[in-house]
Image: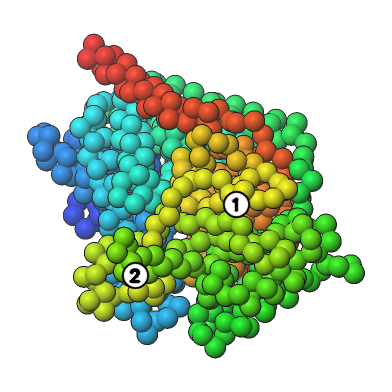
Amino acid sequence: MMGPVIERAATWVARLRGLRRAGVALLAGALSVLAFAPVFAWPVLFVTFAVLVWMLDGCYAAHHELRSRLKCASLTGFWFGFGYFLAGLYWTAEAFLVEPWRHGWLIPFVLTALPGGLALFFAAAAGLAMALWRPGVARVFALAIAFGLAEFARGHLLTGLPWNLLGYGLTANGPMLQLAALFGVYALSLFAVLVFASPAAIAAPEGSGLAGGRFGAVLAVTLLIVLAIGAAWGERRLAIAPPAGTGVHLRIVQADVDQANKWRPENSAEVFDEYLALTKSGMGASSLDGIDLVIWPETAVPFPLGETSDALLAIGDALPAGTSLLAGSVRLVEERDARGDLLPRRVFNSLLLIDDKGELLGHYDKMHLVPFGEYLPFQDLLESLGVMQLTGVRGGFTEGSGPRLLEVPGMPSPSPLICYEIIFPDDVTDEAVRPGWLLNVTNDAWFGTSAGPYQHFHEALTRAVEQGLPVVRAANTGISAIIDPYGRVVAQLGLNVKGILDGELPQALPPTPFARWERLIEIAALALALAGWLACRVHWLR
């Protein structure tokens, strides 16, 4: 009974043309985002990838020349990708509403150019898949190979934006999240396409001759069993993993400062006083007793903290002996050339380490800057046309170097990551020196209570599991948290909550398989998928 129904559905999808095809592909891509935070309805990917497989079947069956097939597939992939990235990144438009009189007019461009540009990766993936498309289950391996490569490229080409990688669809809960320790999210992206597309490969449009039949059923069942075994292993891993601490006690300050008012010069003192008051709040005669490190989020105060002696002295007065502060702040650097002439001032988005005397002990400068947020491509040209990045810093921020460790007295050294630096799976630690933990300071206030902060938070959980390192996250308006190396949230402050979060820094695990062999694992996953495709092709040729 189900066989004919599925075949009719595949036939209807495959025969869509023109605007109807584009609309259904766009809708399927948009619905795919329900698999990710904050909804985590990951089974929806079985439906949306079925639509994609059958649309590509339609391209293969309707066109006999490779060029026509590639064009049809690429357009289908583009519209699927446009829906995926529009629904997954719609919240970026909220940042342009913080100062709507300055940036609001850019929203239509943001909601078309950003999804459209990223959709080109899915268009290329669909085109490559079509070049490899063969009858039977080979087409599932073709799709996985193509999208696995596309997701890796999306995370690395130009500035890279590995947001909502398809592999996150397999990390929706604690047990499944443990798979990241073995494979990492790039390899999981390839596996996710195999898992979610394989049931669709059992059937095919009527008359196309592409159906996988019993081989498709064997592949789909096998992959689901593998996924179930992985989830069972993850549950067992969590069950036998007792919480372990380092004896280092942290205080995260979440001041919940409204982004629209934060950068007004007349509010600078009030914002700083708010952070200082929260730092000193708490129970007991000395509220900071037993606290080794206080953490403020990205650009916590709206002025260069390191250049403001009164603020540094106030911090020193507030901190008891032996307690340090890590605070996000802009950092100004003025240098002279060999002739003594003053060079243009450089501005960094930085994390400053301040001791109990109010002295600067070190800093980290953000290395992954946000295009159009912290700098402009063709900066001088666009500024001359009146376009400014969201931060409003004339000339944009300067790129720092990293990743690297930040030496904090009396505790394991963290690898600092500012804002979305936490989303880059293979660029969060120095390969030469393993940190004791990952520190992510961010200002998600730009994005309100949209899906953005929840997606950002889940990607931080995944980094903890991948690396086997605890993650400490300080966010201006939330979500601030202490996360153990299994991705379990030890303590948390939600969105739009003002307060402090005290907790012990969890103990790091030995390097995970992914942390040891990340690139080899990704290459092996691709090689296995290619071997599966070759095996299917040999069988088909017979």
Which residue is situated farthest in the front direction here?
339
Q: Residue, x 79% and y 71% (percent of image)?
A: 281
Q: Label 1, label 2: how many angstroms apart (C-alpha)?
A: 35 Å
Q: Is residue 24 visible?
A: no
Residue at which label 1 appears: 439
Q: Quadrant of residue 116?
A: bottom left
Q: Position of residue 77 (x, y in %)?
A: 27, 47
Quick one: SS at disc 1?
strand
Quick one: SS at disc 2?
loop
Q: Quarter of the image for the N terminus: give it.
A: top left
Q: Residue, x 31% and y 79% (percent of image)?
A: 105
Q: Is residue 57 left or right of residue 495?
A: left
Q: Is residue 345 visible?
A: yes
**First in sequence: mark 1 vs mark 2:** 2
Residue at which label 2 appears: 342
Specify the amino acid type for callout 2. Leu
Q: Which mark identifies residue 184? A: none
Q: Position of residue 49 (x, y in %)?
A: 38, 42
Specify the amino acid type for callout 1. Leu
Q: Nearer the viewer, residue 442 or 359?
A: 359
Q: Is residue 109 left or right of residue 331?
A: left
Label 2 Cα neighbours within 10 Å, binned few <14 / some 14-19 / many ≥20:
few
